[in-house]
Image (cartoon, grey):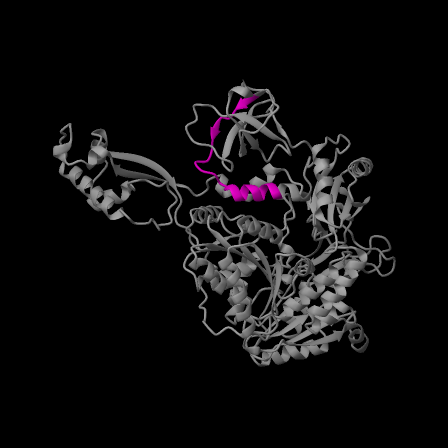
Amino acid sequence: MSGMEEEGLFGPIEGKSAQQGRLVHSNNASLVRVAFDSAGNNQFDYAIPEALEKPLSPGQRVRAPLGRGNRPTVGFCVELSPDTTVEKVKYIDEIVDARPLLDESMMELARWISTYYCCPLGVVLSAMVPAAVKRQIGMVRHCYVSLTDKGRLSPENRAEQVRISSKGQAIISHLKEKEMDNIGRDDHSGKCHDDFEHKPVKLRELKEKLQCGQGPFKTLARQGLIEIVYRRELPQPKLPEDISARPTIDFELNEDQRKALDYIEQLIDQDGFEALLLQGVTGSGKTDVYIRCIEKVLEKGRQALVLVPEISLTPQTVGRFLGRFERVAVLHSGLTSQQRHQYWRWIADGRAEVVVGARSAVFAPLPRLGLIVVDEEHEPGYKQDKSPRYHARDVAIKRAQLNDICVILGSATPSLESLHNCRQKKHYHLLKLPRRVMNLPLPKVAIVNMRTEACERKGVHILSRLLEAEIKRTLARNKQAILLLNRRGHSNYVFCSSCQFTLTCPNCDVNLTYHRSQRDFDSRQRQWVMCHHCLHSSKVPEVCPLCGKKLSLIGPGTQRAEDEIQRKFPQARLRRVDSDSMKAGRIQKTLAEFGKGMIDILVGTQMIGKGLDFPNVELVGVLNADTVLSLPDFRSSERTFQLIAQVAGRCGRIRDTGRVVVQSYIPEEPAIRFACSHDYENFAKYELNIRRRCEMPPFSRLARIIMRDSKLAKLEQAAKELREHINLLIGRFHIEVQVRGPMPAGIARLENYHRQEIIMKAQRPEPIQKLLSELRREQLPALTVRNAVDVDPIYLL
C-alpha cells in the first residue's frame, strides 16, 4: 500500500527550459520536447546538436542534462520542433535508442492515459516499456563477418592485387555462397539485429566450419576484403517451462457460437472500431470463438493480443493458443527480465502472431495489430494499483479505437459498466452464448444456511453437513473438488469476548490476522498474527492484554479450512492455494498436478475461482459466500455475484455431474440468490436499479484524490486547503462535479500514514477531466503531503 501515493502529481505541464547548463538560443537550433519519469508533470525543451548523426523521432529515448546539477537523465522524446516560449535551452547529450520504442499510435495512447488518469506523461511512457527493455537485459555480443565490395570482386577485377592464402580463399568462397543463399529469403531466425543488405555470418560459426583460427580473418580484414563487426543481439525467446501446447480438438460450433463468430468476422472484414461484449455462461466455448476470430485476423496478415487477468491463468490459456498457432508470445510479470526483453523485441519485430499476457501486455508493441481480446473483462486484476492507475480493459478499448480494429470483451459475468455501455453507446454490441457446449446443463447449486447449521450442530464447523457428504461422495467416485474461501490465514481476527478487545495492527487501522504453520519435525506449531497491508507480525498473546481472559479466534481463513478438511478426510490429497502458500510460482506446479489427478481437493482464495478448466472437477464448495459483502464498497454485491458464479462454473464442464454447495449466513441476499440460480439478467436489473437511484457507476463517473502524511494535523490542513481550491475552480469554470470530503479513507491509517480522501462524482468523464486538468496546471503550495489521483477507482478502501 505504500506504493499507492507519489509526490507531486499536480503541477505545470507546459514545456520548460531545463534550468542551467550549456545553453543555446532556441531560435537558432532544432528543438525537441522531452518527458522524464522523475520530473513530475514538467516537460523540457532541448536543442539537438548538429553532430548527432542518428535521426530522432517521438518515442525514442534521449539522454539529456536535467536540473541545476545537469544530471544526465534518460527521457522520452514526445515532440519535435515544439512551439516554445523559452529563450535559451540546453543540448541533449545523445540519442539512446536506434529506433523508437513506441510508435505514433502508442504515443497517442500514452497522451490519452496521461490526461484521463491524471498522470505525468513521463511516468506513463516509462510504464509502457518494460524495464528489461530499457536496460537491454539479456543482450549478447557477437562478432560477424561480411564481404566488402572489394571482396566481392573477382581477383582479376581488383585494382590492387593481393595474395590470399588457401584459408582466406575458403573464407571468401563461403561468404559468397552465404550471400547467394540469402538473396530473396526472409529472416525468421528470431534474432534481433539490424537489417543488412548482405547479412553477415557469425565469426564463431565460420571458424568451426572451416577449422581455422583468427589469423586468416585478421589478414583479410587488413586487406580490405572482409569487414568484422560486433553486434549486440537477443537470443530467440523460449517459452517458460510451465507452459506447453495443449492439443485442440476441432468440433462443430453450436448455433450460438456460430452466430457470434459470423458477426465478429463481418466486423473484422470491415476494418473499423467496435467493442463487442461476448457474454457466455461458464463452459460456453468463448475461447473457441476467440481462436477462430484470431485465425480470421491472421489470414489478413495481422496480429492479435489476448489479455488475461491473472498470471496463474496464463499457462493454461497460452497452452490452448500454442496448440493452434505457431508463433505465440507471452508477456507477464512472472517472466525473467531476459524473457521479457526477448519477447518484447520479438513482438516489436513483427514475428509474433499472437501475444498473450496479463495487464501490462496491453502495451505490447504489435506493429500490425488486428484484434484485441480481453478475457474475463470484469476482473479487478486489470486495474493497476500504482501510477499510472490505468484499467487495462479500458486502455485496450482505447487502443482498439486508435487502431480502428475490434476489441472483444469476454465474460460469463460482465461488469455492469460494460453491460451499460452496450445499451448506451454506438460502437458497443452485446453478443450472448447462453448455453454450454454440447448442451451440458449448468451445475446444480444448493444453498446452506449456516445460521441454521450452527443451531443444529455441536461445535464449530467450517464445512456444513451437506458439503461433507458431497465431498465424501466425490472422493468415492475418484473425482476432484474445489473449495473456495476468500480469506487468507487461519482466523480473521483475535477477539476477547469478555472486554471486547480486538488485536489490531500498530501501524494500520485494521485487525491482525492469525496464522499458524504446519507442525514441523519437533511437533510444535508456530503461531503469529500478521497485518496483510504493512506485513507487521508478532507473537500471539497468551491472554487478553486488558483483562487477562482467554482470547478467541474469529472468522475462518484458508489455513483453518485446510486443518478441518484434513482432519475429516485424512485420505484425501489436499492442497491449499493462496498467496501465503503459493510462493515463487508454485501455483503453476500445483495446478498442473491437479490437472493430472495428483490432488483430490483444492482449497483456496479467489485464485482458484476463475478461468480454470479441469474436466474431472465434480464438486465446488463456497465455504463462506458473505466475505466480500461485508466490505464497505458499492461494488460488493457485484463482486459477490461474480465470484460465486465464476467458481460454480469450474465443475460439470464435461459431463452432467457438476454440483455446487454455497454456504452463507445470509442466503436471502439477492447477490447470493441470483448467483445460485445462474441468473445474471435479473441480478444486473436489480443492481443497476440500485446504482441508478444512488447515482453511482455506471450512471456516473468517480475519481479520488488520496492524501497521506505521518502527521494528522498537517494532513487535515492540506486536505482542507485542497478542497477550498477545488471549490474555487468549480466556481470559476462552472464545472458540474459533486465533491465529497475531505474525509478519512476507508482504511484511515496504513503503514503509520494517516489517509484522507476527496471524492469527485460527475455524470460524464469530461467535467472530472476538466477539474483535474486545471488542478495540474496550477501550483498548489498548500498541498505539501503525498498524494495520488485514482480515476474510475474499483475499490474505495
- Asked if residue 104 lies in the magenta stretch, the reply is yes
Q: Position of residue 638 (x, y in %)?
A: 72, 62
Asked whether residue 751 appears in the rendered view, the answer is no
Whether residue 82 is in magenta: the answer is no
* Residue 279 point in image, percent of width and height: 62, 66
Name above or below for residue 310 compared with residue 58: below
Q: Is residue 620 left or right of residue 98?
A: right
Residue 257, located in which quarter of the rendered image? bottom right
As drawn, is 618 to the left or to the right of 218? Answer: right
Left or right: 365 in relation to 494: left
Q: Position of residue 162 (x, y in %)?
A: 14, 30
- Image location (x, y in percent) of residue 399: 56, 49
Please tell me which residue lies in front, 285 or 96.
285
Specify whether 497 is left or right of 708.
Answer: right
| Residue stretch rendered in magenta on the structure | 89-112
Q: Residue at x 48, y 65 (%)?
A: 292
Q: Count all numbered tags in the image, as a single digit.
A: 0
- The answer to whether 276 is drawn above or below residue 53 in the figure is below
Answer whether residue 411 is visible to the viewer in this image: yes
Residue drawn at point x = 17 percent, y = 41 percent: 170
Q: Which residue is rendered at x = 57% and y = 78% of the image?
A: 439
Residue at x-position 74% and y-position 45%? 704
Q: Quadrant of residue 128?
A: top right
